[in-house]
Amino acid sequence: MALNAARHIRDAVYLDTNAWSMLAKGDMPIEPLAAWVQQSNCVLWMARMQLAELAARPDIIKGVADTIEKIPVVIIDRGVNDLHGLPWHSVPVNLRQPLHLTTPALKAEFIDQFSGSLMIEARDHLATDRDRFRAWLQQALLVAAQSSPKGWSAFPERVKNWIRQMCTKNGCNVVEDALENPECYAGARLSFAVLFSRYLVNGQGWRESDYLDYLHAADMAYAKIVVTERNMAECIRQALRRPEVSGPELTVETDWLRAPHGPP
């Protein structure tokens, strides 16, 4: 993974929570994905958002463990390092933990940790953050609706302002030169672009899952392939048509799991 980063090569497959759930419940076979990942020199990436969301589903935790028994994953967390203004391939990783549940003891420990108090606290914290985010977003949308220009023509300046706000909120210095480079602030750019596409271009209303999608998108910017639901996939594809945004080489829906393939 370090060598690929040095060569500016994305190598991670990012499954959203719905894709993980389908694998865990047996609605999608794991064998095609396991074979393709191994043959393609890629890794199956699990970020903190998948961990938090899957932990809220006690009905599929054992299925998740069964899946990780058949295909190793790597837990990767970049923290707020995306906001330091570095190109995506130079952003440091706070945590990189390979995970392969090859014994009954490892599977039992994984299930126990997923059901523990730390994961419950993390879910509660996410719910509080979501409610605050919704209140802030609704106010921001009111302001945006009254301003000009409209649609994607407003995106270049608004994404810069968004990045400045996120840097200030998280105590990071803004690197002004990096604001002009689509490979810098990659996660902040893509996550904002998803919101922008949904609310200011497509006119969608708020859904409870939108906050988690926003957080997922910040991680998806670093993946090679993203497997997600239809609306999210279309938002990402729209965003990646913009020269101000960089991200995954291929964004697909969950049917991709039946016959995995690489970017064209």
Image (cartoon, helix red, strand yellow):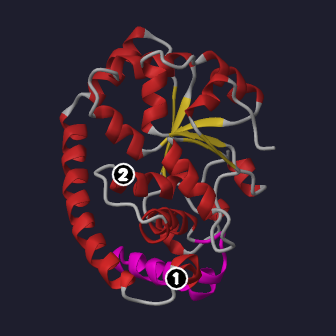
Question: In x, y percent, where is residue 189?
Answer: 54, 69
Which of the image's four quarters has the N terminus? top right
* Residue at horizontal 39 percent and vertical 81 percent from the top: 165
The stretch of residues the image draws in magenta is 157-184
Q: As rendered, which of 158 and 62 lies closer to the eye?
A: 158
Query: Is residue 117 positioned above or below 91 on the image?
Result: above
> How crowded is the residue under tag 2: few (<14 C-alpha within 10 Å), some, or many (20+)?
some
Task: Residue 199: say if magenta.
Answer: no
Question: In x, y percent, where is residue 95?
Answer: 47, 48
What residue occupies the far top of the structure in this picture?
A: 104
* Residue at horizontal 24 percent and vertical 46 percent from the top: 122
Q: CA distance from mark 2 to mark 1?
A: 22 Å
What residue occupies the far right of the structure in this picture?
A: 264
Q: Residue 212, which numbered label?
A: 2
Query: Is residue 135 positioned above or below 220 on the image?
Result: below
Task: Say which residue label 1 marks.
Answer: 160
Q: Identify the secondary structure beneath mark 1.
A: helix
